[in-house]
Amino acid sequence: MQIKVIRKILEANDRISEQLKNLFQEKKILVINLMSSPGAGKTTLLETTLTDLRKEFNMAVIEGDLQTSNDAERIAATGAQVIQINTEGGCHLDGSMVLEAAGQLELDGVDILFVENVGNLVCPAEFSVGEDFKVTILSVVEGDDKPQKYPLIFAESRVMLLNKTDLMPYVDFSLEKASGFARSLNPAIEIFPVSAKTGEGMDLWYNWLRSEAKNKKR
Amino acid sequence: MQIKVIRKILEANDRISEQLKNLFQEKKILVINLMSSPGAGKTTLLETTLTDLRKEFNMAVIEGDLQTSNDAERIAATGAQVIQINTEGGCHLDGSMVLEAAGQLELDGVDILFVENVGNLVCPAEFSVGEDFKVTILSVVEGDDKPQKYPLIFAESRVMLLNKTDLMPYVDFSLEKASGFARSLNPAIEIFPVSAKTGEGMDLWYNWLRSEAKNKKR
């Protein structure tokens, strides 16, 4: 009984996700579903990215949180268009939330739309929100075993950003171990060690975005 | 429809949780439901606690993870009794999983049972596993806004452990802000800044455990 209901929810989500994909395809918008644990640095990564690439791309953000509009305010301060979704206890975004939020954005002319999911390494991985790619941030402070312990999200992601590399001297974290676990789940995953705070390593992430935004315009 | 099903699941869980409470009451075992984001330091806190208090208490651990028995192996190395639950994708433990695991432990003589939940600041808060107290760890690296953004788990917890204080010099984290947000949700919450890695601040946590273990024996 429980499984049947969950399957129905997933099927309903897949239908809405297809609608979103068609909308974003028509408008040639690259859509990134950005996921991580709470506090791994999703919003800081977006602030840095939106600031550094603002001359190259028109970017918009859909923010997902249980409560507060703190993150949307931080994003708005960069000058980007932003809509906040409050899930009121819900542990992930879904297609219908993103469809409603997208209707409140001016999508014409947008090159890249970032959907910042609820901070959670489990549930968000199961629900497509019409994205081209899932991107998961793992902060080096969380430990190099996390891809092994939370396999689905890393198996589903095109990119793993290893964030907070500025804290590497103070924690026990092996880039090789974390990368090895992620690649064993997902041989094609791109892995970029970055510090969204200091800017270190962000160029590889930006080059990946540039390349995928260009592919999307074709 | 969806809401009705979720309510049924919660009601079924509450019944099993009552069964567990009776079992733990009868055996006078203090039960702690330990929750946090992935990588906030639940297992390290347990390793330190189990080692430092092993002469005072008989302690056992139920480990919850999506996959792997890594954490149970770390706990077993301290000499404590441990059972690993793999939720295979499930985002939290529930009463029935803990009931099954408890049946595989030798509970006679145990003073304190720690249930280490799946790393997640959202879903675990909704499901009682027969605990006396929920205890949530927030790592200072995650940011001081987390109680405001994930209110339920902090509202439900008797203790908030602010872990990884050894990293305080390298991050922007205000103990006052984090504590203020948590107390506004939950005026009775106990707040202990600790470093499970260096041992700093652990005495207040131990004193709280000693006091509650004693209360439970009455």
Image: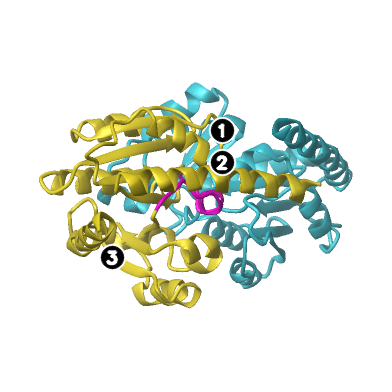
Chain colours: A yellow, B cyan
Residue A40, image x, y percentages: 38, 51
Whether A121 is among the magenta residues is yes
Q: Quick check: can you spot residue A40?
A: no
Chain of the residue under the numbered disc 3 shown in the image = A
Q: Chain of mark 1?
A: A
Q: Which mark is residue B9?
A: none
> What residue range appears in magenta?
A119-131
Disc 2 packing (10 Å; few <14; some 14–19; many ≥20): many
Q: CA distance from mark 1 to mark 2?
A: 7 Å
Residue type at mark 1 is Gly
- The disc numbered 2 marks a residue on which chain? B
Closer to the camera in the image, B103 or A7: A7
- On the same chain: label 2 and label 3? no
Left or right: A125 in relation to B92: left
* Residue annotated with mark 3: A193
Q: Residue at x 40, y 74 (%)?
A: A188
Q: Nearer the viewer, residue A80 or B99?
A: A80
Q: Which residue occupies 50% across, 41% down?
A: A95
Residue type (three-letter) at the residue carrying disc 2: Val
Q: Which residue position is annotated with label 1? A: A89
Q: Left or right of B60: which side holds A82?
A: left
Q: Which mark is residue B122?
A: 2
Q: Is residue B209 left or right of residue A86?
A: right
Closer mark to the observer between disc 1 and disc 2: 1
Spot occupied by residue A81 in the image (x, y as percentages of width and height) = 26, 33
